[in-house]
Amino acid sequence: MNSKKTQCIHSGTLKDDVHQGTVSPIYTSTAYDYVNVDINAYPRYFNTPNQQAVKNKISALENAEDGLVFSSGMAAITTVLFSLLKKGDHAIFQNDLYGGTHYTITTQMERFGIEYTFVDSMDWKDYEPAIKASTKLIYVETPSNPLLKIIDLKALTNMARSKKIITLIDNTFASPINQNPIDQGVDIVMHSGTKYLGGHSDICCGAALASRSLVEGIWDSAIKMGGSLDAQSCYLLERSLKTLALRVNQQNQNAQQISEFLSGHEKISNVYYPGLTNHPGHDIAKAQMSGFGGMLSFEIRTDPNAFVKKLELIKSAMSLGGVESTITCPAQTSHSKISAEERLKVGISDGLLRVSAGIEDTDDLIADLEQALTMI
Ligand SMILES: *Cc1c(COP(=O)(O)O)cnc(C)c1O
């Protein structure tokens, strides 16, 4: 079962020994026998049947030995970070991380005596000088949000490994269909499952995938922090994952076509999509990804809100990764908590718009963008 399409359907599925049904039964119990069992199941211990089923599916999709499924992406990210870091440790972060992660680092780390450095570069060589004797981990996102910048994972992890530093990636934007960072040597892969994994804009969840020994350490913190996912949501997530490969392949296609259409338009100044040959990270993306993803962004020469209001099919929405195409203005949403000065420094202008391509017909999406562009 090495094919993503097959793993999406079959990996992790619970066997229904009682009724011989085809799909995983949902076990809502929060109380389990402790006498005649091998494992003592309890939801906050991340070991109930539905938690295990969906964690096994995502682990298979990420080529990981093991994993944990959380109640949100941020639950996954904060649990992983605070399980690895302690007072006196130092951590290195790529500068243009997801807004919520960036905000968590700048508001929480110092309180716990953890030192950190942001590296404003997607060149792996720029991470080496930031390393100190106390450096525990390097954390990156590729493609990054919202400019879809690419970092060379293999080169970065080779360097980190030689210095015994753990590498982490937030793989939300790529999804396991387009990128499996563990194959490039990354130690821990995290997801906001609220996006592509759930895929229908109706579940909030997260995941962390790694080797069995690393997951054991994260689990030890996770059972205390308590960010576990309930059985019904685990089942919904498992159900959603069955179409992940189909959805992402269509999203890849739509994003590519939309990027090419926008690239030639007079009212658009810049298009950022790793699938475009003029994207600075195109060659690395081509080598380490099996698809370029469903996310793209562009700069509009006129008022971004006026343009968004003219769109009929593509909805303005803060999130991403759903079956419906959505658009957002990062300066007003995901990056609003970062100062205007800081935003400009990382290249997020007020006219930048980010599109999450859905699975609609490509021509309908392009027609919608075209009509809105002629109206402004
Ligand atoms: C949404 C998102 C998160 C946070 O996930 P939640 O499920 O909202 O907690 C983290 N990283 C990235 C890249 C995201 O898009």
Image (cartoon, grey):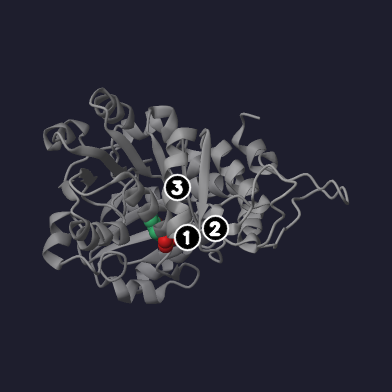
**Residue 120: x and y, percent?**
16, 46
* Residue 238 at x, y percent in the picture: 64, 52
Q: Quadrant of residue 28?
A: bottom right
Mark 3 — residue?
Answer: 220
Asked if residue 8 shows in the view, the reply is: yes
Badge 1 marks a residue whose secondary structure is: loop
Near-viewer residue (4 or 80): 80
Residue that carries the numbered disc 1 in the rendered image: 226
**Residue 55 to residue 359: above or below:** above
Which badge, 3 or 2, is on the more N-terminal residue?
Answer: 2
- Mark 3 or mark 1, which is nearer the start of the sequence? 3
On screen, residue 333 above or below 32: below
Label 1 amino acid? Gly
Indicate the amino acid at tag 2. Answer: Arg
* Residue at x 59% of width, y 58% of height: 43
From the viewer's perspective, is 12 left or right of 130? right
Question: Residue at 33% across / 43% down in the picture?
Answer: 142
Mark 2 nearby-residue class (10 Å; few <14, some 14–19, many ≥20): some
Does 129 sit above or below residue 341?
above
Question: Is the residue marked 1 within 8 Å of ligand 1, measured from its CB?
Answer: no
Q: Label 2 vs label 1: CA separation?
A: 6 Å
- Which residue position holds label 2? 44
